[in-house]
Amino acid sequence: MATSLRRFGRLALISRNWSGRGFSTSPSGEINSYSNIQQSEGKSINLFSAINQALHIALETDPRSYVFGEDVGFGGVFRCTTGLADRFGKHRVFNTPLCEQGIVGFAVGLAAMGNRAIAEIQFADYIYPAFDQIVNEAAKFRYRSGNQFNCGGLTIRAPYGAVGHGGHYHSQSPEAFFCHVPGIKVVIPRSPRQAKGLLLSCIRDPNPVVFFEPKWLYRLAVEEVPEDDYMLPLSESEIIQEGSDITLVGWGAQLSIMEQACIEAEKDGISCELIDLKTLIPWDKETVETSVRKTGRLLISHEAPVTGGFGAEISASIVERCFLRLEAPVARICGLDTPLSTCFRTLLYAHQEQDIGCNQVNNKLLAILLL
Amino acid sequence: MALTHRSSNLLRPFTTAVFSSTPSLRRPFSSSADDTTTITIETSVPFTGHKCDPPSRSVETSPKELMTFFRDMAKMRRMEIAADSLYKAKLIRGFCHLYDGQEAVAVGMEAAITKKDCIITAYRDHCIYLGRGGTLLECFSELMGRQGGCSKGKGGSMHFYKKDSGFYGGHGIVGAQVPLGCGLAFAQKYSKDETVSFALYGDGAANQGQLFEALNMAALWDLPAILVCENNHYGMGTAEWRAAKSPAYYKRGDYVPGLKVDGMDALAVKQACKFAKEHALKNGPIILEMDTYRYHGHSMSDPGSTYRTRDEISGVRQERDPVERIRKLILSHELATEKELKDIEKEVRKEVDEAIAQAKESPMPDPSELFTNVYVKGYGVEAFGADRKEVRAVLP
């Protein structure tokens, strides 16, 4: 099995026909590389439909893939799994009882038998009962068995982040907890096109992956998404916008805020380089480093509380690598160190309330940084 | 003067139910709330026990209690309907889970216990809070995230608490409150004050692992913990039988005794909770499965009609509704007239409207409250704003 795992690795991006069976069952036919998909036209769809497409393809292309979780049989609370049970049957797409630890533990076992287990945790806030299974079972399975066993086929999908009125248990961004665990990957897409390509990569990646979906963008983000089977590389970040004065790093829903901030900053004559990290662990240090070497400044932004967030890790790494090139301290503009109460939504998620523009806040801070 | 009154199965439509009142029961309405009168009513559905002898079906009550049940449940019902409208008017934000249909559990449980007994529940907590003596004003203020709310507006719909009457609150994560309930019970056993803890959870939560962990500890140490499964038959959109191999939740404790109760009958709930409290103080934990029903969907984002038929909902409303059941009992015992009951409902409606109007006047929490209560005061913990530069506060 180890051989077949290696075969499938990161090479998946290169167009190639897969033939062998085994664990690394590949998408049928050609797999587009990213340069191809940028040209290929697709329908305009929103993020949950893109996820839905990816799951259709994943189930279609690998008969040993399964989708399960709370209410997924009915399409899920965010409609990401709509139509899957009808198309692929209740033996491959099914509801689980309400037991997150059980769901993930079950998924680890299923994946250990060479299957692709695509588990859904209904909200990222509910993932904590499964934390033990992810950290202690999934992440260390390969290592502690001396590579005899693994659960590489495991992908855990969970909607994360604030929707303004989510409150304490429907708003959290727990990505940093998982970035502290060697053995798993953490991936967060920013848009429908990204979501589809990255999710397919995660599902086919031979490592267990936690895939957080920005629930704020499920319906909001719409873009043209190719209908065919394509994958986007993991651990490769993307420069969304080139600039010369400051590097901005973010992921997921926060990028849409940062994009606006870039536009506002442009008006003040500040040229921003915006980077989507996409994979948080293992992350693409080189792209960020190159960018910071060019601009001399770095700002990291995420929704999760600022203290101990993944921004801290990026900040530390870049200071190590680019200390002499930095013209200002690395800035972090992140969530507050508080729980997420609905009554404070206008303060916590200014960007999602139409009356207040968060970009004003961000730009003010940007301006301070540049002075 | 104990009068035994046997009613036929209340599950049948009212028209077929036979209520034979003896002439001696007919009293002027004005004296209907006579404390000294005891009425014995038989529950329509017998209790089913698991490893315990079920209590008697004959429940003693009084005219006063029945009238209180009616008023309280009518108030709960009205409050939830109003919350529904407020949510749709976007005055309540976030998640909101309504209790209408399940009122008998909240009311019946309170009737059997004291405020020194503890209750801990999940997120469907509005009416439990009201039952523990909370006010409508605090309810609506909390729902709308105002300072006047029972959690100062910082909790919202899912997080109601009332410490002075032993309500340990609404908890957001499915099943997480049950081990807490066992912790409460341990403290109670330790203090030897003859009180018990009720840990409420739904049929969805019944499949969570921590529930069984908690149950084992409770049984191992003979804790006065009563696990109350409010079985409304759907965990979100999933019918109980799709999620549980054995939907007989009262038996799920295996070595822990259980009791299945008609959760739509406040009197049956009262009898069961009384029985459970006695049992728990003597023998340790027990599971009560309340067979109940929620009329609304799981939360406000669930119309509640995709996974069950409208006929099913209206059937329960017609045949098992907890408020109507008490109304029928009151009328059959001639404790009040139909008009008097209608008047009570009107009063309740007015109370609710007034509470909403008042709650709207309550200000939103001050922004400084963002950082309070994260840690205990005075420990010098630093918290940061969005940038770790401009906003940096030693937590108040």
Image (cartoon, rainbow, N blue to C red):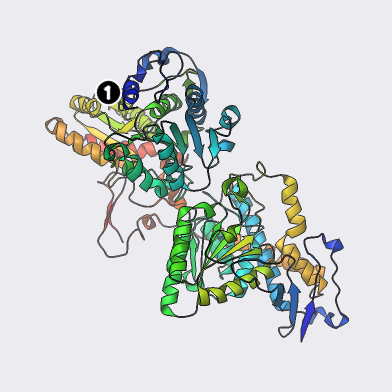
In the rendered image, the vertical position of residue A277 relative to residue A305, given as above or below: above
Please give left or right for residue A330 compared with residue B364 in the image: left
> Which quadrant of the view contains residue A139?
top left
For the residue pair B53 and B347, the one nearer the viewer reads as: B53
Q: Is residue A306 visible?
A: yes
Q: Residue at x 44, y 59 (%)?
A: B213
Q: Quadrant of the N terminus of chain A?
A: top left
Q: Residue at x 26, y 58 (%)?
A: B381
Q: Residues within 10 Å of mark 1 (few under 14, many from 20)?
A: some
Residue B272 position in % (x across, y down):
63, 70
In the rendered image, the vertical position of residue A25 relative to residue A135, given as above or below: above
Residue A242 position in % (x across, y down):
29, 22
Of all chains, the one bearing label 1 is A
- Marks counted in the figure total 1
Q: Residue at x 18, y 26 (%)?
A: A293
Q: Quadrant of the C terminus of chain A?
A: top left
Residue B134 position in % (x across, y down):
55, 68
Q: Is residue A162 visible?
A: no
Kind of element beneath mark 1: loop
Extreme right residue here?
B23
In the rendered image, the vertical position of residue A79 relative to residue B316, given as above or below: above
Which residue is denoted by mark 1 in the rendering?
A243
Please give left or right for residue A179 compared with residue B109 in the image: left
Residue A262 position in % (x across, y down):
33, 29
For the residue pair B44 and A161, the one nearer the viewer reads as: B44
Please give left or right for residue B332 compared with residue B257 in the image: right
For the residue pair A53 and B223, the one nearer the viewer reads as: B223
Q: Which residue type does callout 1 highlight?
A: Gly
Extreme left residue here?
A324
Please give left or right for residue A260 compared with residue B267 in the image: left
